[in-house]
Amino acid sequence: MNAHYSDYFQKIKSIGASGTEHAYRTCFENLLNLIKADERIRIIQEPKRIKGFGAPDFRIERDGAVIGYIETKKPDDDSEKTRKSDQIKKYLNICDNFILTDYHRFMLFKGGELMPTDSCDLFDSTDFERKNAVLHPDRIGRTDRLFSKFFMSSPVRIGDSHVLAVHLAQRAKVLKEYISEILKAKETYDFSDKIQGLYENFQETLVADMTEAEFSDAYSQTVIYGFFLARLQSDEKITLHDAGRFVPLSFKVIKEFFSFISLDYQIPNHILWIFREIISLINNIDLKSI
């Protein structure tokens, strides 16, 4: 195990302290795949985000269910300042198992708490310049224990209707913010065009003076209800691409919403992230207990 961390350290050092955030990702992904506790765990590196929008850099799944996320920053990033940023607070509102790292310091957050439950430095930022720097065994041990806690996490399993409502409301809030941002940006690509078109159609046929904020809220609530309805109608777990076919034809508005979700109309990465979060949560509901 020590050799995996030492090899990672040398590869990170070879890039140097001034590389971009993305320059270190492959080294880090390779380390995660070597130290993960279970071969059923998948390490999924998310595509480069659109400026102004965000989704965690790594999604961690076991048997198709999300068990955690990892956000990476450059080695010279102020991790304490980043920890308190709106971006990280947004992630922690949703992610019960989350790591923030600048590739040498690792902070593990559990249960959405703003203070890390565990934190350690595999090496110091000054080690980038030290030719003969080596990893200390104690630091390797602490880092490995942190990742063990992270990988041992289980997907959220909900059997209480009130708890379910709280979790879905948290995700609806984030989705609403993202849809509102898309409406304000008015950029031209498939998903944005579809959202803009739906908003204009709502104004023409339902509520003429509907605001962007009101539409964003209606959209997020309707999509979440649609995913939940699809799960109730299905005998198995749903996916982003098949959820729409489980929505009954009598729910015409929801069917319209899902017509371009299921067909993947250039859905931006941050929207895909929150959709997957909603689906992962709904797929792990104990339906008999709700």
Image: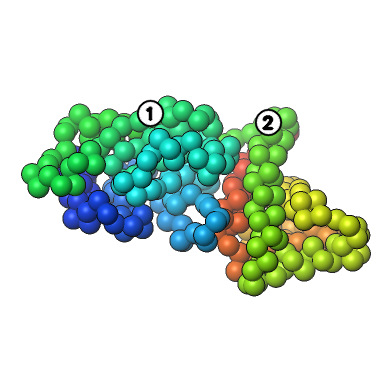
Quadrant of the image containing the N terminus: top left
Instruction: Answer with left or right where residue 41 lies relative to residue 240.
Output: left
Q: Position of residue 78 (x, y in %)?
A: 37, 41
Instruction: Answer with left or right where residue 157 lies relative to residue 257.
Output: left
Q: Is residue 122 visible?
A: yes
Say which of marks 1 and 2 sits in front: 1
Query: Which badge, 1 or 2, is on the more N-terminal residue?
Result: 1
Residue at the image position 68 percent from the left and 31 percent from the top:
163
Locate residue 83: give its quadrant.
Answer: top left
Per the model, the C-alpha gap separating discs 1 and 2 is 26 Å
Q: On residue 138, which mark appears?
A: none
Q: Position of residue 21 (x, y in %)?
A: 36, 54
- Mark 2 Cα within 10 Å, few/some/many (few <14, many 20+)? few
168 or 268: which is nearer to us? 268
Q: Position of residue 213 (x, y in %)?
A: 76, 51
Residue at the image position 50 percent from the left and 30 percent from the top:
114
As shown in the figure, which amino acid type bears the numbered disc 2?
A: Val
Locate residue 144: give its quadrant.
Answer: top left
As shown in the figure, which amino acid type bears the numbered disc 1?
A: Asp
Q: Which residue is mark 1?
A: 118
Which element is circle 2 on? helix
Residue at the image position 17 percent from the left and 42 percent from the top:
127
Give yes or no for contact between labels 1 and 2 (Cβ–Cβ under 8 Å).
no
Residue at the image position 72 percent from the left and 35 percent from the top:
165
- Mark 1 Cα within 10 Å, few/some/many (few <14, many 20+)? some
Locate residue 2: give its quadrant.
Answer: top left
Q: Which residue is mark 2?
A: 163
